[in-house]
Amino acid sequence: MSRIELTPAERALRRSEAHHLEPVVMIGSDGLTNAVSAEIDAALNAHGLIKVRVLEGDRAQREAWLNELADALGAAPVQHIGKLLVLWRPLPPKRKNLSDERKPGPREYKVVKYGKKPGQRPEIKTVRVLGNQRITPGGLVKKAKRRMKSAKKAGAAQS
């Protein structure tokens, strides 16, 4: 993959967004291994903007690792300050797992109960109704009863 190039304004925006972040990956004494690169790739997929702390190596080595990571992972090198490297890659679109068996979720209704005396404020409450429930005219939530099928209809469906 090739690295992403940022304009100076975009780079300044990413630096300001990364200011409060903590490092999520550390490069230890073994250097930049395949396992560390895989962790950085996973962190970029999850967060988009990450900080990497480098525990070993001199400035030139850290700069080389930043460029190597940006090229290998298709990310943008945002900043190299001290022993911190900041990388950014746009988040991939999330996939929704749609199932045909999935039922609709709970619904919320507002139930208004008027007071017995005129001039009283009505009592308003929000009620969550699940798929097997219904609201009575009095505002109570009850489970739906199973409908009884007649013997004639049940016999006709089987034959």
Image (spheres, grey):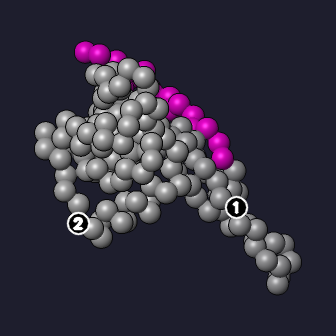
Residue 102 point in image, percent of width and height: 37, 34
Residue 43 seen in the figure: no
Q: Tell me if residue 113 comes above or below residue 86 in the rendering.
A: below
Give the farthest residue toward the left: 2
Where disc 2 sits, the SS reads loop
Q: Is residue 118 left or right of residue 155?
A: right
Q: Nearer the viewer, residue 105 or 138?
A: 105
Q: Is residue 82 left or right of residue 146?
A: left
Q: What residue lies at 50% left-to-right and 29% top-to-bottom?
A: 148
Residue 95 point in image, percent of width and height: 28, 40
Q: Nearer the viewer, residue 154 or 80?
A: 80
**Amino acid type indicated by mark 2:** Thr
Residue under numbered circle 2: 7
Residues under numbered marks 1 and 2 in contact, where contact means CB atoms less than 8 Å apart: no
Q: Which mark is residue 102?
A: none
Q: Place residue 34 in its image quadrant.
A: top left
**Amino acid type indicated by mark 1:** Lys
The local crowd at label 2, few if under 14, some if 14 to 19, many if 20 or more residues have their Cα within 10 Å, is: few
The magenta-colored residue range is 141-159
Q: Which mark is residue 125?
A: 1
Distance between the alpha carbons at the discs numbered 1 and 2: 52 Å
